Amino acid sequence: MKKLLSIISLSILSIIVYAQSDNDYLELAREVLSVEKKAVITEVMELTDAESQPFWDLYNEYQGKLYTVHNKRIALIKDFADSYETLNDEKADEIWTNYIKYQQELLKLKNSYYKKFKKILPAGKAAMFFQAENKIETLINAQLAIEIPFIETK
């Protein structure tokens, strides 16, 4: 799993070279991440034949909802970047407040889907899935933390 998580990190970093624009970069990063993430999840989960189909159906549904929620984070990052040069206290407050709303929505989604995964998997496997998701998300968040500068209000 360490090897696959390292590959994900390198894949995300190397995408910058090939992208033509920010939107191209974003969609390319999402495609690569989706494929790499699925490989990690496949390796980690070790699903039985009986678990496999229901799991992947629910996984795909969850990833679709996650994509929508993560669009809000992307919008926040773009908003921050667009207003970085002229950022004032009010805008900084707005961005942070919206970030908290995004985090709450993400947590609500995870909680909801954890319950759904427990209906088709033993609780230990459902928790392991979300642990793997968390590790991948932590790698992405670490990269974002490196790339996004601190707020400097004018």
Image (cartoon, rainbow, N blue to C red):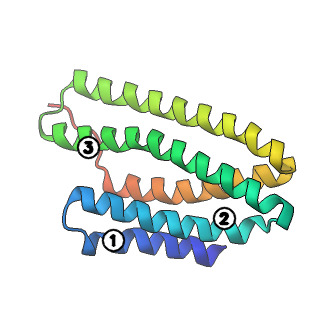
For marks 2 and 3, give the CA distance: 29 Å
Residue 150 in the figure: left or right of residue 58: left
Comparing 136 with 19, the one in front is: 19
Q: Which residue is mark 3?
A: 78
Residue 129: which quarter of the image?
A: bottom right
- Whole-angstrom CA distance, mark 1 to mark 3, is 18 Å
- The residue drawn where x is 73% and y is 67% is 44
Say whether marks 2 and 3 touch (CB < 8 Å): no
Is disc 3 placed on a helix, strand or loop?
Answer: helix
Horizontal side of residue 112 vs 5, given as left or right = right
Can you say which quadrant of the picture contains the C terminus? top left
In the depicted view, which residue is nearer to us: 105 or 87?
A: 105
Q: Mark 2 = which residue?
A: 41
Disc 1 designates what residue? Answer: 15
Residue at x-position 68% and y-position 58%: 56
Residue 2 on image: x %, y %: 63, 74
Q: Is residue 83 visible?
A: yes
The amino acid marked with disc number 3 is Lys
Task: Tell me which corner region of the image, top left, top right, bottom left or bottom right, holds residue 132.
Answer: bottom right
Residue sitting at x 32%, y 30%: 95
Q: Is residue 67 above or below residue 94?
A: below
Q: Position of residue 84 (x, y in %)?
A: 18, 40
Q: Is residue 48 visible?
A: no
Horizontally, residue 114 falls left or right of residue 71, namely right
